[in-house]
């Protein structure tokens, strides 16, 4: 996500709104109607059919990572690896349990996120980004004309490679912030490595093949998303529909709100406080030659409760070329994507128009 963003905006109204935080608007509570650029949905546009007519909706698959042992020959491992492939080639995501991160660390990372967003506005603004930057406290850069804005504020930081950190954006308050982020991100390094190997094995590939594509200097970025309550939850989204530009993303939340698109329908991701969601980004779709899917997802706003989510984006090293794994290509399965590098730079102008970018990598 290291890229230059045009400093001149053709969207002055959005720019003005984005120079303030959603949380400020909510705390000041002086608006009768949401500012127009936040309005994305027409009321009743997409009321779901009655539950009874649908039967029980399918659920985001749950995978117990503790069942995957170092020897993938064991039956238990084989079962779970098969489930990983099935989940990621249909849903593009799964809820991981048994992922080896203590409940207390999961609670703490959410807690420091909450504590940060509870600070006084002036204190948070010490870490403010401009409306054209990615890192720091604020919102997404100003989108193109006609695109709506998200009902959320966030804090976005690059954690690895360590020499890419911009400490001016790292809060000193709460005091434990840096230590806990570092501890959590060390765990994320272990977990992403484990998941890369498991995905490779589930596709009958050499277990290190994806790790090699990500490279030694792969990027780990953390984003705390804070969704203020929103009186107009039927018309305003917490986060617009998008797929991630990452390799893959690991998400934790403290309230329901995230939805993934599957077979043209939206499904809620259940909120299980001690599981995490593993969600494919466009670059894993490319490296897996389209077998693993990068799902479109969005976040609803909620009229009663606020919500914190913590997303970790795991992305191939800057400047490194990635491409579909050779072992997945044969006569029946031709290569679908070309070699690309720095996909995030290609992706972003499309994201700003509310569009997907994966077609730019297609052969
Ligand atoms: O808040 C969430 O659950 C999802 C966040 C997300 O999709 C993102 O930050 O890209
Ligand atoms: Fe996302």
Image: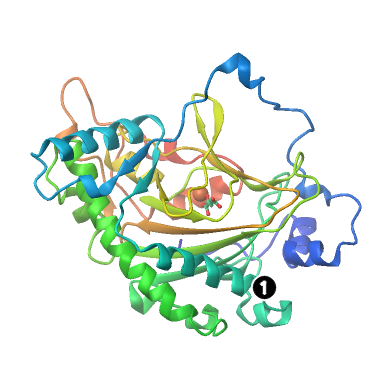
Which colour scheme appears in the figure?
Answer: rainbow
Residue 2 visible within the image:
no
Res 211 → quadrant: bottom left
Residue farthest to the top? 53
Residue 63 placement (x, y as % from top left) = 32, 41
Badge 1: residue crowd in 10 Å (few <14, some 14–19, many ≥20)? few
**Quadrant for the C terminus in the image:** top left
| Horizontal side of residue 298 vs 92, given as left or right | right
Q: Position of residue 358 (x, y in %)?
A: 43, 39
Choose between 41 and 230: the one closer to the eye. 230
Identified at 19% across, 33% down, the residue is 328
At 49% across and 78% down in the image, what residue appears? Answer: 177
Q: Position of residue 355 (x, y in %)?
A: 56, 40
Q: Residue at x 74, y 28 (%)?
A: 45
Asked if one can make out residue 114 in the rendered structure from this viewpoint, the answer is yes
Residue under numbered circle 1:
118
Numbered disc 1: secondary structure: helix
Q: Is residue 284 above or below residue 293?
A: below
Of residues 1 and 104, the one nearer the viewer is: 104
Image position, residue 47 (x, y; %):
71, 26
Q: Residue at x 51, y 42 (%)?
A: 270
Q: Nearer the viewer, residue 335 or 36?
A: 36
């Amino acid at each position: 996500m290291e890229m230059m963003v045009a400093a001149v905006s053709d969207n002055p109204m959005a720019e003005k709104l984005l120079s303030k935080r959603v949380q400020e608007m909510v705390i000041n509570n002086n608006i009768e109607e949401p500012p127009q650029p936040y309005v994305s949905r027409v009321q009743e546009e997409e009321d779901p059919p009655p539950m009874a007519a649908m039967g029980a909706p399918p659920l985001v698959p749950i995978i117990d990572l503790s069942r995957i042992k170092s020897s993938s020959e064991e039956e238990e491992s084989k079962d779970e690896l098969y489930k990983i492939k099935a989940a990621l080639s249909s849903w593009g995501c799964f809820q991981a349990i048994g992922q080896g991160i203590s409940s207390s660390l999961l609670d703490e990372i959410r807690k420091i996120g909450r504590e940060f967003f509870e600070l006084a506005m002036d204190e948070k603004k010490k870490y403010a980004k401009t409306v054209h930057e990615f890192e720091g406290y604020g919102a997404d850069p100003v989108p193109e004309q006609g695109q709506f804005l998200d009902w959320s504020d966030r804090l976005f930081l690059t954690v690895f490679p360590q020499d890419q950190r911009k400490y001016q954006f790292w809060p000193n308050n709460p005091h434990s912030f840096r230590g806990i982020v570092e501890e959590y991100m060390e765990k994320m390094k272990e977990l992403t490595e484990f998941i890369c190997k498991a995905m490779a094995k589930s596709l009958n590939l050499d277990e290190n093949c994806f790790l090699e594509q990500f490279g030694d200097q792969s990027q780990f970025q953390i984003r705390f998303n804070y969704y203020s309550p929103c009186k107009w939850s039927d018309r305003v989204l917490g986060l617009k529909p998008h797929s991630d530009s990452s390799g893959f993303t690991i998400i934790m939340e403290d309230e329901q709100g995230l939805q993934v698109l599957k077979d043209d329908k939206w499904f809620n991701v259940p909120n299980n406080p001690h599981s995490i969601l593993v969600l494919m980004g466009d670059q894993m779709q490319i490296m897996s030659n389209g077998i693993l899917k990068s799902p479109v997802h969005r976040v609803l706003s909620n009229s009663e409760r606020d919500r914190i989510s913590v997303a970790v984006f795991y992305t191939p090293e800057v400047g490194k070329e990635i491409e579909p794994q050779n072992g997945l290509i044969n006569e029946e399965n031709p290569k679908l994507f070309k070699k690309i590098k720095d996909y995030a730079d290609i992706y972003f102008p499309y994201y700003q128009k509310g569009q997907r970018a994966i077609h730019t990598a297609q052969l």
